């Protein structure tokens, strides 16, 4: 039996039936109330007498009491059987010679007396038995020896404390095991018992809706990283289903009694061949090998493969159940794809020939029922185990004295999910879901049009549905198949042009009518998806059995809709790039450049109102019905244009109005289109224009000033991008994101004010050519356009720039951006693109839907018939993966280890070669044996062993054959910031050989003077078989040979950064320095690090040292530490903000803040205290000043302060170049940039080959290389 559950108030669960009900507000600790509440049904009474009378008649109380009595009876029956078994195993055998040992007072005598004498006066005595042997579970006996769990508890060595291994959160109920039903759920039989109510039906409530709901908080133990999970659930509901606990390295074996059904295929052979055929469109050699393995399998039957009518089987595999006979379609459990004829009403104004509103039939709309898809998902045995029923709040406490902060990651752990869950629990129960747990089904939509071919006009507009109850780590992998295609949206057909010409005397109407028809068509299709079946499910729920055997009532709710900006305004019924282009607030276009400034208050104070929008749209549509044109200036535009609205009623507002659903609130941020190929792409393109505009005769001082300003901007852009794409946020990182957003807006405006507006720039040549091609395409005249380069500006202050300020609020509401990024939808476009060649290119939407059903049903058949094999750990295992605590240790346990080095002995090295005196090797010194000794004897550091002591101890060390064995690869395993497991591969003699180590002298007190890490380049990786004849530091003597691994490192000297917004720099120690070389334990390596050459310092002086031991050398004098290479590396430079970096869980570090005199870049003048000349003026004055780029250069203190506070106050009077109010496109000279691919923005490496100032050229090349580096980082 499970132990009593301790509630947050400290009262055991067994005492919860006392007349001290627990009432609380949402997410607060429970407090005692003066009223009396029934713990089962929730009814409240004023006195205990009335409560006692109610409990005697309460149905739920009786039911729970009956269940408790049954459980108690089973418990005592189990104890009685166990006691009887013990008596049978310990009872002596009565036979010949047995009485001789049964002396009075002996144990045997007592047992024999108890067994033979039935007198009630004889009492049962306690017999002390010998410990029973540990029974090995049957599943371990069936598994191979390599997969069995050892009896000895495995513990990580003490030196691994800086890299704590991840583990799942502690379970709330450790002894609870819910039964897993292996048999698939029969939806047809279930629907015969539980019918989904039709719209006219009325379901009376059992309890009045005004009764308060008492929530109970269940809190887990704090994990090894300081994380706690808190569930807020109604009384009687326990969070017994936790998919995080299923994330082990060994899947449970399914029952062998599961009925085998292969759908339309009569045998396993036919099923495997069909799966092989449909699993991929283009077959590879790997697919060929899979086919060979199928043929070689013991159960393969050639007769079963030949006797199949494959054409009929494939047709049944993709058809709907209604299209087949009852016998042929009995195996199908889903409703398949459906078709609906779509018609739209086209308004003709009173000046046209056909006055009034006429219906136009567009075509057939292919879609799936959302409710049917929900049933298919929840009835799946595979997906049901990973489906989260209960939301929770995850909090993190860095140290016992640190404040507890909230964690933001998964959608099912977000504030929006918890709020919706509590609202759902407050709904009155119905007679159908009485006593059932009510679960929120989080729906997440993606939609985006895509081209199916590289050449031609074949396109598809799919809509994908994901479930937020599943982990975002699994949703982001297309191989998991968690993205479901629910619709193929239609576009306006070409026949609409002929129809409008016929209705308008052969003339085409204005483009405004076509835009109006496109909006109506889109929302008409969504009206089909949001039909009565879906609205009834939102209102009454869907009752389904779950894999744990319980009946639950599921209520679908829409949480997010991911789309690019043109589709967002289409979904929300807004004007594309209108006067108020934002769908969250009513900010004017003239104010969207004030990102992060104090005057950027519209996003917080002037929110959009759905009721106000619907009122305006209703009035406009009444005017259209009266005969006004859809773009009438007086009746339509005058009312809608100031608010950025269009005359269309969205399907979400029409169908989901009774649920107070606002579609604008679920349109989430889009980092792919808004920043990566939006703001950043435009900035990078303009930087290339600036490089072309600058002459090669530029002065060094001017290049240095522009370089400093540009590098700060690039640093802030990279930091903002890294923070926005974190997979796990907390309150500390979100505060840093707000801080970085303020700096990003300010530095972007300052860069435009002080640089871009004062340097005339023109299009790149490829931009001009792309513009000419687009213009020729639009005109369709075949005439070639001029490719002359036109003036071009930065033009970055668009609506995408404004959206960057909403990321913090959206992350706090829905979790991290990787959960709803449009990149997920882009990845799933690969499936229909790969299916398209298998169609006949005519009516391919219907054929694609059939292919989708074939692949989905094949996957479902496999999940229901196969027995999962033991899984092995993979890189990037999801949060909660258990390593040391797994039930079974897999054969491939490389992620258990701190590092991995090969075991081959192909390359050996004699120890006689490691002395400089013997061979004159610059990479060697006379103290290397001492350093190797420190590794072998586990000394704290080489400095602890003097030369004399090392030589003295060296005589006690025996190295087999006096040789070391070298390796090229060293794999470092580490725990990432978001509590995942990852691996870095260090390759000797390549640029991928730099590593980072912890600096022991770094702490909170020494932070300003010390850097948290030290860096080194791997010169070699070795192992040796060593025997130590002396005494180790712990007093142990062991003369057996054991393998010792160690790495040879060339250390870097840390130089630091120029200011707060620049990268740190390092330089390799000279080989003649005592600090240059060392042998280290691979366990001390934290992970790999990315170093970028510092071109301004130049290449290394002198010829490269020739060495037989080291085949790589440093080409440059100094390097930048690229902290933005990946997210985990970036978080290692944010002290105290990473959950998974246990070594950073120390005292609080000072957080960033914006000073009061910070220059937000709003004013038209330069910051006070600095006189900035325009680049053009500097060029005209021919100013030449030497640039201080010495290796040990120091930065004046004032410059560091200016990086945070530039000394200017916010000013007014500066007008930013505004975009036109065009509805169809973003005006400006760079409005075509989004149509260009990434390959059209390659850097011109040879653009500075003219004769000029050679001293300025290295700085220009460095700027160009840094741009290339940032582009690679953003693409990664």
Image (cartoon, rainbow, N blue to C red):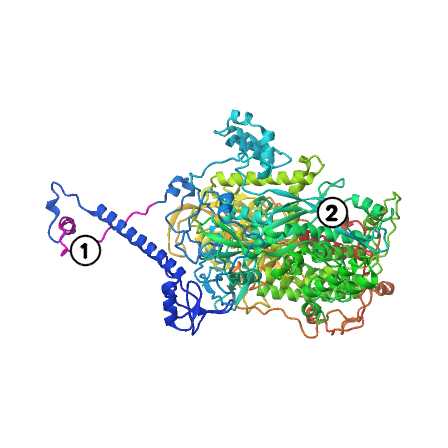
Q: Nearer the viewer, residue 1229 or 637?
A: 637
Residue 843 % position (x, y): 70, 38
Residue 478 visible (yes or no): yes
Q: Nearer the viewer, residue 32 or 399?
A: 32
Q: Which mark is residue 125?
A: 1
The correct choice, above or below, for 12 with respect to 112 in the image is below
Query: Does residue 619 show up magenta in the picture?
Result: no
Residue 1013 % position (x, y): 57, 60
**Is most of the magenta stretch helix, strand or loop?**
loop
Residue 1254 visible (yes or no): no
The correct choice, above or below, for 868 with respect to 525 in the image is above
Q: Residue at x 38, y 72 (%)?
A: 48
* Relative to 354, 4 lies left or right: left
Q: Residues within 10 Å of mark 1 (few under 14, many from 20)?
A: few
Q: Which mark is in front, 1 or 2?
A: 2
Q: Which mark is residue 491?
A: 2
Numbered disc 1: secondary structure: loop
Q: Residue at x 47, y 59 (%)?
A: 224
Q: Residues within 10 Å of mark 2 (few under 14, many from 20)?
A: some
Q: What residue span does the magenta drawing correspond to?
A: 108-135
* Relative to 470, 55 lies left or right: left
Residue 374 % position (x, y): 56, 49
Q: Nearer the viewer, residue 855 or 1188?
A: 855
Instruction: Measure the alpha-carbon separation of dots 1 and 2.
Output: 86 Å
Q: Quadrant of residue 1221?
A: bottom right
């Amino acid at each position: 039996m499970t132990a009593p559950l301790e509630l947050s108030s400290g009262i055991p669960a067994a005492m919860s039936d006392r007349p001290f009900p627990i009432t609380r507000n949402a997410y607060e600790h429970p407090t005692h109330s003066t009223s009396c509440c029934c713990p089962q049904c929730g009814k409240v009474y004023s006195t205990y007498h009335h409560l006692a009378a109610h409990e005697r008649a309460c149905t739920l109380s009786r039911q729970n009491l009956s269940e408790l009595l049954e459980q108690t009876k089973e418990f005592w029956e189990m104890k009685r059987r166990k006691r009887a078994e013990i008596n049978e195993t310990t009872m002596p055998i009565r036979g010949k010679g047995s009485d001789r040992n049964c002396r009075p007072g002996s144990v045997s005598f007592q047992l024999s007396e108890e067994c033979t004498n039935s007198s009630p006066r004889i009492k049962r005595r306690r017999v002390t038995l010998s410990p029973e042997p540990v029974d090995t579970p049957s599943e371990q006996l069936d598994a191979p020896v390599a997969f069995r769990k050892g009896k000895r508890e495995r513990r990580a060595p003490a030196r691994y404390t800086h890299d704590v291994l991840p583990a799942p959160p502690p379970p709330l109920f450790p002894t609870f095991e819910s039964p897993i039903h292996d048999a698939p759920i029969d939806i047809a039989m279930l629907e015969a018992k539980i019918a989904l109510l039709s719209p006219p039906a009325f379901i009376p409530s059992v309890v009045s809706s005004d009764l308060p709901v008492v929530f109970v908080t269940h809190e887990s133990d704090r994990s090894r990283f300081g994380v706690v999970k808190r569930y807020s659930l109604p009384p009687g509901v326990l969070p017994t289903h936790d998919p995080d606990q299923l994330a082990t390295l060994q899947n449970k074996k399914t029952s062998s009694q599961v009925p085998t059904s292969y759908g339309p295929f009569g045998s396993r052979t036919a099923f495997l061949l069909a799966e092989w055929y449909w699993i991929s469109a283009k077959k590879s050699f790997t697919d060929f090998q899979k086919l060979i393995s199928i043929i070689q399998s013991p159960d393969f039957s050639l007769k079963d493969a030949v006797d199949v009518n494959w054409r009929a089987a494939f047709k049944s595999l993709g058809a709907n159940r209604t299209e087949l006979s009852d016998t042929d379609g009995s195996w199908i459990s889903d409703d398949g794809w459906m078709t609906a004829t779509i018609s739209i009403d086209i308004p003709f104004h009173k000046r046209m020939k056909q006055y009034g509103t006429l219906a136009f039939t567009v075509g057939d709309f292919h879609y799936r029922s959302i409710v049917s898809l929900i049933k298919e998902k929840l009835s799946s045995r595979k997906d049901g185990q990973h489906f989260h029923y209960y939301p929770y709040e995850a909090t993190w406490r860095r140290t016992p004295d640190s404040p507890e902060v909230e964690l933001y990651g998964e959608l099912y752990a977000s504030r929006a999910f918890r709020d919706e869950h509590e609202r759902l629990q407050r709904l009155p129960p119905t007679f159908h879901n009485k006593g059932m747990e009510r679960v929120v089904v989080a729906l997440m939509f993606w939609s985006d049009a895509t081209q199916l071919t590289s050449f031609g006009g074949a396109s598809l507009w799919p809509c994908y549905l994901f479930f937020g109850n599943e982990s975002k780590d699994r949703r982001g992998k297309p191989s998991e198949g968690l993205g479901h295609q629910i619709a193929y949206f239609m576009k306006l057909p070409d026949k609409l042009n002929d129809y409008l010409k016929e209705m308008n005397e052969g003339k085409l109407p204005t483009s405004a009518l076509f835009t109006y028809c496109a909006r109506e068509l889109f929302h008409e299709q969504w009206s089909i998806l949001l039909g009565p079946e879906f609205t009834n499910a939102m209102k009454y729920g869907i009752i389904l059995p779950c894999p744990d055997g319980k009946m639950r009532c599921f209520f679908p709710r829409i949480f997010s809709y991911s789309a690019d900006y043109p589709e967002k305004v289409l979904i929300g019924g807004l004007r594309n790039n209108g006067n108020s282009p934002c769908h969250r607030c009513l900010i004017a276009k003239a104010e969207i450049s004030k990102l992060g400034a104090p005057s950027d208050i519209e996003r917080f104070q002037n929110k959009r109102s759905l009721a106000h929008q619907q009122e305006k749209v209703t009035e406009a549509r009444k005017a259209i019905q009266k005969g006004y044109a859809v773009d009438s200036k007086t009746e339509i535009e005058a009312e809608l244009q100031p608010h950025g609205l269009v005359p269309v009623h969205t399907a979400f507002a029409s169908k989901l109005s009774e649920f107070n659903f606002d579609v604008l609130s679920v349109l989430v941020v889009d980092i792919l289109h808004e920043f990566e190929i939006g703001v950043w792409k435009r900035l990078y393109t303009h930087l290339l224009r600036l490089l072309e505009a600058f002459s090669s005769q530029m002065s060094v001082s001017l290049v240095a000033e522009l370089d400093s300003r540009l590098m700060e901007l690039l640093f802030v852009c990279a930091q903002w991008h890294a923070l926005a794409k974190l997979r796990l946020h907390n309150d500390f990182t979100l505060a840093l994101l707000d801080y970085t957003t303020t700096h990003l807006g300010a530095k972007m405006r300052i860069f435009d004010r002080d640089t871009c507006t004062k340097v005339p720039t023109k299009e790149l040549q490829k931009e001009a050519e792309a513009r000419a091609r687009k213009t020729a395409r639009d005109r369709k005249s075949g005439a070639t356009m001029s490719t002359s380069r036109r003036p071009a500006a930065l033009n970055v202050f668009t609506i995408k720039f404004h959206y960057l300020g909403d990321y913090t609020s959206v992350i706090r509401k829905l979790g991290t951006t990787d959960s709803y990024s449009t990149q997920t939808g882009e990845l799933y476009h690969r499936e229909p693109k790969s299916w398209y060649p298998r169609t006949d290119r005519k009516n391919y939407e219907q054929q694609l839907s059939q292919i989708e059903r074939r692949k989905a049903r094949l996957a479902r058949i496999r999940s229901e018939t196969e027995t999962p094999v033991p899984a092995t750990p993979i890189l990037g295992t999801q949060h909660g993966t258990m390593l040391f605590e797994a039930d079974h240790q897999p054969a491939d346990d490389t992620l258990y280890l701190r590092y991995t080095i090969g075991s081959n002995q192909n390359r050996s090295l004699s120890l006689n070669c490691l002395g400089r005196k013997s061979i004159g090797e610059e990479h060697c010194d006379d103290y290397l044996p001492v350093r190797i000794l420190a590794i072998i004897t586990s000394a704290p550091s080489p400095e602890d062993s003097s030369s004399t002591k090392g030589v003295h101890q060296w005589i006690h060390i025996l190295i087999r054959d006096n040789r070391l064995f070298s390796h090229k690869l060293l794999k470092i395993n580490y725990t990432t910031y978001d509590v995942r497991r990852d691996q870095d591969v260090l390759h000797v003699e390549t640029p991928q050989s730099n590593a980072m180590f912890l600096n022991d002298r770094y702490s909170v007190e020494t932070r300003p003077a010390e850097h948290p890490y030290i860096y080194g380049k791997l010169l070699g990786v070795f192992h040796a078989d060593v025997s130590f004849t002396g005494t180790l530091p712990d007093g142990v003597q062991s003369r057996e040979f054991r393998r010792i691994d160690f790495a040879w490192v060339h250390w870097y000297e840390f130089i630091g950064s120029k200011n707060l917004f620049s990268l740190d720099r390092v330089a390799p120690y000279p080989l003649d320095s005592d600090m240059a070389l060392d042998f280290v334990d691979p366990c001390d390596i934290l992970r790999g690090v990315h170093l970028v050459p510092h071109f301004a310092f130049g290449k290394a002086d002198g010829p490269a040292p020739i060495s037989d031991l080291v085949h790589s050398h440093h080409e440059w004098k100094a390097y930048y530490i690229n902290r933005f290479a990946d997210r985990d590396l970036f978080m290692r430079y944010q002290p105290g903000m990473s959950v998974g970096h246990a070594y950073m869980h120390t005292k609080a570090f000072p957080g960033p803040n914006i000073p009061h005199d910070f220059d937000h870049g709003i004013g038209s003048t330069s910051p006070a205290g600095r006189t900035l000349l325009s680049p053009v003026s500097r060029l005209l004055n021919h100013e030449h000043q030497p640039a201080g780029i010495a290796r040990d250069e120091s930065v004046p203190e004032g410059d560091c302060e200016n990086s945070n506070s530039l000394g200017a106050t916010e000013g007014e009077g500066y007008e930013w170049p505004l975009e036109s109010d065009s509805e169809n496109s973003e005006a400006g000279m760079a409005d075509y940039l989004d149509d260009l691919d990434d390959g059209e923005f390659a850097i011109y490496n040879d653009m500075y080959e003219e004769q000029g100032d050679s001293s300025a050229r290295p700085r220009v090349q460095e700027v160009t290389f840094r741009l290339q580096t940032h582009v690679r980082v953003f693409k990664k």
